[in-house]
Image (spheres, rainbow, N blue to C red):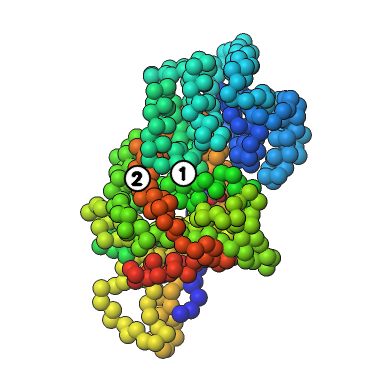
Amino acid sequence: MTEGLVVPMDVPREVAAAPRLPERGTPCTMIILGASGDLARRKLVPALFHLMNDGLLADDFSVVGIGRARMRDGEFRGAMRGALADSHVGASEHSAWNEFAGRLEYIDGDLADEAVYAELRDRLTTIERESVTRNGAVRGRLFYLALPPNAYEPTLTRLSESGLAPRLDDARARPWVRLIIEKPFGRDLVSAQALDGTVSALFAEHQIFRIDHYLGKETVQNLMVFRFANSIFEPVWNRNHIHHVQITAAESVGVEHRAGYYEGAGVVRDMFQNHLLQLLALTAMEPPVAFRADAVRTEKVKVLDAIRPFDADEVARYALAGQYGAGTFEGKPVAGYKEEEGVEKHSMTPTYAAVRLMIDTWRWQGVPFFLRSGKRLPRRATEIAIRFRRPPHLMFPETEGQSISPNVLAFRIQPDEGISLCFEVKVPDHEFRMATAGMNFSYAGSFGPSEHSAYETLLVDCMLGDATLFTRSDAVEAAWRVVDPILDAWDASPPGRFPNYAAGEWGPREAESLIAADGAKWRTP
Ligand code: BG6
């Protein structure tokens, strides 16, 4: 088989010039609960700085961070400037930084302490009054729970009891109050339902934004456009034409400094229950009637509900767990999971999983969906690959070393976002030979580098009250219903002898047998 040919697809200039995030957030104060933590430093503050520089934050926007680290406003600003430098977001422009810094405030304290809420009330009152006096702007309140999951319920309760985050049954009520809740939303179905019980007792659903940052990624949104703004693919998007679907989220990093969280989570709670199942839902859902939050979310949840649940004795056959041992990455030796800082020496936490799921609908009957994700794999790559069926009858002879490769449509979510389609062509010479060629569309090639991170997209959406790319509670619960039997089976009996793959490998060898049983092979993204 010869190398794939690559035919870049051109996009007209006027399309390429179209802005990708045109709307500006409405006036608000964002209260980051857990502001001295990792998420605020690595994702939220860089995203906000970027948005401000692009003119996508309202003039009346500021941040009040609350965290345990003892800092004054000035020290918090210094720490956030360091965070921007670490994230390679240029804060070098003095005037931009000064403008941004002027919008940051900080309260140190424990969220279990009433005094924190009293201080927050004072700060918000001052900020909100100033906005009204200055230009009549009425600010909303956006609470971002960047906290360990066990802090969600008590914090939501205190926010509600303090009156700082009142329930607003009317979605048009102003000033608005919204809350972004980070994943994981619960640690199984029962705890997710309990958390939802608290949330719905305290707030209206339109106030709650359950974030899954994968839904803010460009290609994830483009998947909807690709499927529902084109007419040529939808007719083949079903069991008659698709052999199977592979969804891969490969990470090259290890657990980094997050062992405290990851040891209790593992890859299924960390990546499958949310990101991977959301990708599956977008790939498999029926066309929504409108690009509106509820229409899209309803179709997604139907897919999740239709995933065939595993019986306990099916888990060993259709789900595989792995944990990385010592190995090499980019030529350098790297530690195994058990040797990472903060990880228990005999840890049985899986850092890799591969799962075969079936969706019980007319469209997808008999089409396996293979999902895999792992840490310390050879490279960072997330993709959705649709593998089509072979032609029903082949008129060309398949000989030794000459067989046809089935068509594959692959959505590269990261890095190098794009879409590629592989098909067979005849090699132009006298002898009859076939080769696989590819058409490749690259976002960066056609539109220039992507300017906005997933968090930027989602933060602006929340400021605008658009929940289309956030997860509804029924979807969260449906996803737990899918993964709970796997987690229960692995809790009841260890899923394998760990480590079972070396850092720098594509997961345990058995992953190949899991997919080979359906006559398929994992792609190398
Ligand atoms: C997070 C997980 O939700 O997603 C991390 O908690 C993971 O463990 C990360 O590394 C991957 O996100 P991305 O955007 O880098 O693919």
Q: Vertical placement of 33 versus 517: above or below?
A: above
Decide if residue 330 is on the left or right side of residue 489.
right
Decide if residue 149 is on the left or right side of residue 97.
left
Residue 24 visible to an observer of this rendering:
no
Residue extending farthest to the left is 362
| Disc 1 C-beta below 8 A from ligand 1 | no
Residue type, numbered disc 2: Arg
Q: In x, y percent, where is residue 163?
A: 50, 15
- The mark lying in front, picked from 1 and 2, is 2
User: Mark 2: few, some, or many residues within 10 Å (few <14, many ≥20)?
Assistant: many
The kind of secondary structure element at disc 1 is helix
Q: CA distance from mark 1 to mark 2?
A: 20 Å
Q: Vertical placement of 282 versus 109: above or below?
A: below
Residue drawn at x 41%, y 56% is 493
The quarter of the picture where residue 478 lies is top left
Q: Badge 1 is on which residue?
A: 215
Residue drawn at x 30%, y 51% is 309
Q: Vertical placement of 165 versus 78: above or below?
A: above
Residue 146 visible to an observer of this rendering:
yes
The kind of secondary structure element at disc 2 is helix
Q: Nearer the viewer, residue 324 or 123?
A: 324
Q: In x, y percent, where is residue 399?
A: 36, 87
Residue drawn at x 48%, y 28% is 153
User: Mark 1: few, some, or many residues within 10 Å (few <14, many ≥20)?
Assistant: many
Q: Badge 2 is on which residue?
A: 481
